[in-house]
């Protein structure tokens, strides 16, 4: 059965649709809140909108540090489909509170909701990746993870666009967003009701409620298997790389490309479509195996096309005209090349990330799998915070955005080189993979 055939099965489609709707809802709310803060609440509260937006991002990511250890333990100890349904019920409650925040224009309530959404995502992460190996055969893991990644980035794109469109409608926008997030939350719970049961991995596990010691425990647990640990580092590096690019896109559009919000959306679309396409290609490229050799291939593309964005620099038409581009004008003046680079960065990113997730799932001990995935989530969050710190520091020393693309391209070479030095099997499998591509 190919990856699209999985959508016709009860063992995959309910978890796929639950994940899709959850990511969709997260991004409807996050983007609408960011715009609402920037254009409504900041003025009313007489506060700096940039600080509020940064605070919002921090509140969403904080639960990954605080609660991942608990989430991993729960997912290993208890039946996963039951936990997912309870998390989806919690999402309905959280989104109901969000509607109160929008209706009464309460910034504290909306910020608290963002924190609880992050907590809900933290609890769901080990469950969604931990349940896949229990319901899919090993030959289906790469395709299944590819579908999950494709669906997630499509949901992020659609949620971001729709959240921005709805909240901008005056004066009904906040009510429309409130109704939509509630409706999507209910749909997510209904989808979760069809997820088949998954036998608890370790019912004898004794829960450790000390967040600090258990966080250290699960990080040590992830380090016990060398292959799994370095695969997690490789995944976390991709989150660093992707977070850096996504955070730079608005400024890149405005300050380098002389574009408007529509061009930012176009660039985000190219990146998201690329990741979806690359993720779907993995099953075909790997021959339905968990192919470690795809990671170096993806890494090459990530550096190559980030470097090309540096080469493009400031398009000549911008320096000559000094005017804002429309979408049509942008495409006519080297915009096609920027779009191609971002789409291919996304595509090679999908090729890079999907086999790594499948590798972690397949090589983790069944009784520890969810806790190891929780450790992965902690490191993902840490790398994203490091990305934000580096970006702020580079802006402070007057790095241009094209120079940042160059730096990330070079850093990618060094990080992947370190991972391959520690795990030569990645490169061995890469050469084996290339050998299979040669014509007979």
Image: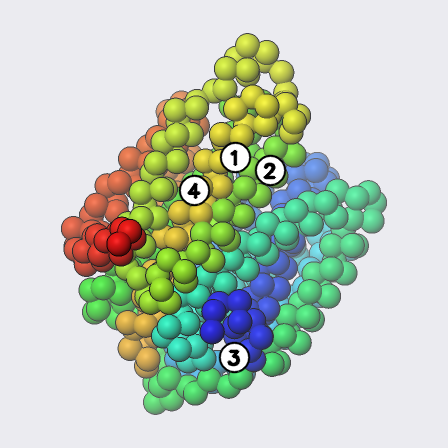
- On the rendered structure, is 220 left or right of 248? left
Counting from the top left corner in percent of width and height, residue 98 is at 69, 60
* Residue bearing the label numbered 4: 345
Circle 1: is it few (<14), some (14-19), or many (20+) Cα within 10 Å? many
C-alpha distance separating marks 1 and 2: 8 Å
Give the position of the C terminus as an image quadrant. Answer: bottom left
- Cβ–Cβ under 8 Å for marks 2 and 3: no
Evaluate whether residue 344 shows in this view. Answer: yes
Q: Marks 1 and 2: CB-CB under 8 Å?
A: yes
Q: Secondary structure at mark 2?
A: helix
Badge 2 is on which residue?
Answer: 266
Quarter assignment of residue 328: top right
Q: Residue 327 appears at what percent x and percent y?
A: 64, 29
Report the Cα–Cα distance between label 2 and label 4: 15 Å
Q: Earlier in the sequence, mark 3 or mark 1?
A: 3
Is 435 on the left-hand or right-hand side of 378? Answer: left
Residue bearing the label numbered 3: 11
Secondary structure beneath dot 1 equals: helix
Task: Please name the residue shown 47% across and 74% down the image.
Answer: 1
Label 4: how many residues lie within 10 Å, few (<14), some (14-19) or many (20+)?
A: many
263 relative position to 424: left or right: right
Disc 4 element: helix
Q: Residue furthest bottom?
A: 204
In depth, the one of 339 and 201 nearer the eye is 339
Position of residue 116 relative to residue 388, above or below, is below
Q: Classify 10 Å Cα crowding around label 3: few (below 14), some (14-19), many (20 and above).
A: many
Q: Are marks 3 and 4 in contact (CB under 8 Å)?
A: no
Q: Which residue is mark 1?
A: 339
Mark 3 and mark 1: span between their CA atoms?
37 Å
């Amino acid at each position: 059965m190919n990856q699209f055939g999985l959508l016709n099965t009860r063992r995959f489609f309910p978890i796929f649709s639950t994940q899709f709707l959850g990511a969709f809802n997260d991004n409807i709310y996050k983007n609408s809140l960011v715009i609402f803060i920037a254009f409504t609440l900041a003025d009313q509260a007489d506060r700096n909108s940039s600080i509020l937006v940064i605070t919002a991002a921090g509140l969403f990511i904080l639960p990954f540090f605080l609660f991942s250890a608990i989430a991993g333990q729960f997912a290993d100890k208890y039946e996963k489909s039951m936990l997912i349904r309870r998390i989806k019920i919690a999402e309905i409650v959280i989104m109901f509170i969000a509607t109160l925040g929008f209706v009464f224009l309460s910034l504290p309530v909306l910020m608290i909701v963002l924190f609880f959404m992050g907590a809900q995502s933290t609890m769901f992460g080990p469950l969604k990746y931990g349940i896949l190996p229990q319901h899919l055969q090993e030959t289906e893991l790469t395709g299944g993870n590819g579908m999950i990644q494709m669906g997630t980035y499509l949901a992020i794109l659609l949620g971001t666009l729709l959240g921005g469109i709805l909240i901008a409608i005056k004066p009904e926008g906040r009510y429309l967003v409130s109704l939509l997030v509630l409706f999507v939350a209910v749909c997510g719970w209904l989808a979760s009701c069809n997820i088949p049961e998954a036998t608890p991995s370790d019912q004898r596990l004794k829960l450790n409620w000390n967040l600090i010691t258990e966080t250290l425990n699960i990080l040590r647990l992830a380090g016990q298997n060398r292959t799994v640990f370095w695969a997690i580092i490789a995944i976390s590096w991709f989150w660093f790389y992707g977070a850096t690019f996504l955070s730079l896109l608005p400024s890149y559009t405005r300050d380098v490309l002389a574009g408007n919000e529509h061009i930012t959306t176009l660039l985000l679309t190219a990146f998201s479509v690329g990741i979806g396409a690359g993720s779907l290609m993995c099953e075909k490229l790997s021959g339905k195996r968990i192919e470690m050799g795809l990671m170096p291939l993806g890494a090459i593309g990530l550096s190559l096309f980030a470097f090309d964005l540096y080469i493009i620099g400031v398009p000549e038409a911008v320096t000559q005209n000094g005017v804002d581009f429309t979408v049509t004008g942008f495409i006519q003046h080297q915009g096609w090349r920027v779009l191609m680079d971002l789409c291919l960065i996304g595509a090679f990113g999908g090729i890079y990330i999907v086999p790594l997730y499948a590798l972690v799932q397949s090589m983790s001990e069944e009784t520890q799998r969810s806790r190891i995935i929780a450790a992965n989530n902690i490191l993902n969050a840490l790398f994203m915070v490091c990305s934000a710190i580096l970006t702020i520091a580079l802006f402070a020393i007057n790095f241009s955005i094209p120079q940042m693309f160059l730096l990330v391209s070079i850093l990618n070479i060094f990080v992947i080189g370190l991972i391959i030095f520690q795990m030569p099997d990645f490169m061995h499998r890469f050469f084996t993979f290339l050998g299979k591509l040669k014509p007979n």
